Image (cartoon, rainbow, N blue to C red):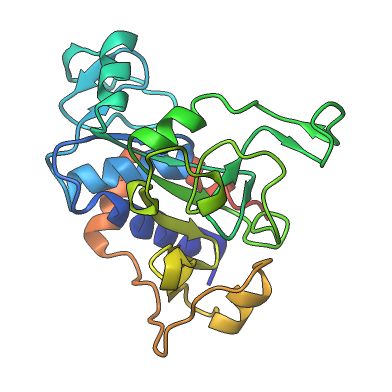
Amino acid sequence: MSDTTLIDTIVCAAAQAWKDDGEVLATGIGVVQRLAASLAKLTVNPDLMMTDSEAWMVAEPVPIGARGGYRIRRESHMGFARIFDNVWGGKRHAMVGPTQIDRYGQANISMIGSDHQRPKVQMLGVRGFPGNSISHANSFFVPNHGPKVFVDGEVDMVASVGYNPARLARGWRLDDIDIRLVVTNLAVLDFGGPAHQLRLCSVHAGVTPEQVQQATGFEIHVPRAVPTTPAPSAEQLALLARLDPHGLRAGVLGS
């Protein structure tokens, strides 16, 4: 499968994360994530709420990249106060791109290395990950599925909570954590395995379950039958061309 075909498969698979959400704010942090949320609103969940990534709710998803003559169909102001009310009220589903993910679904975007005072690599910091992970549903996109992302042991810095009993806050249960889909360049996964084990849901065309396991730093749950991720439909491809008129998604996976 070429990278161009693969990235479209990935976006369409990621859009399914919002399928059964109803009226929630869909937030996609990144090109693929934003396109996936937009595609979801136009296909599987028209009740999704979206913003223009600035301060307005919009009636239809805004194309990514330079907008040219496109006129945004704004509906209402969505300032930070309303955003935080929405987040803390649980009416949001974000798809983000962690640098590391562990067997518990804990994610890291902060730093690499065991010494927090002298990290090997300093990244973004935890930003909104802690509050997001305890307040609403989250999904992950990983463009390069490998053991450096899906790490053995725990992530170097726990920026968002997962299904780790040892780190649950007082009064919390594992079922209070809501990690939906994990979409990568190899497969679609979730945490629906035994005891919230990372489970293989589908493999992209040309990929085997064994390859996914080899690229993961811990054991995943592989069902007896693993389907192939569906290829994009003609309707989905036409919508993606409209949502990404400059073809920015083609550069996400690299060469």
Q: Say which residue appears at 37% left-offset and 23% top-offset.
A: 67
Residue lying at the far front in this picture: please name it: 170
Q: Quadrant of residue 214?
A: bottom right
| The one of 30 and 176 positioned closer to us in this rendering | 176
| The one of 39 and 126 positioned closer to us in this rendering | 126
Taking the image as drawn, is residue 186 in sight? Answer: yes
Answer above or below: position of 183 versus 242.
below
Task: Give the side of residue 112 with respect to residue 127, left or right.
Answer: right
Task: Give the side of residue 5 with respect to residue 60, left or right.
Answer: right
Q: Position of residue 157 (x, y in %)?
A: 68, 39
| The one of 161 and 49 positioned closer to us in this rendering | 161
Q: Position of residue 54 (x, y in %)?
A: 36, 15
Residue lying at the far bottom in this picture: please name it: 224
Answer above or below: position of 52 versus 238.
above
Q: Position of residue 137 (x, y in %)?
A: 33, 43
Q: Say which residue appears at 47% left-offset and 49% top-offset.
A: 140
Task: Give the side of residue 193 with respect to residue 152, left or right.
Answer: left
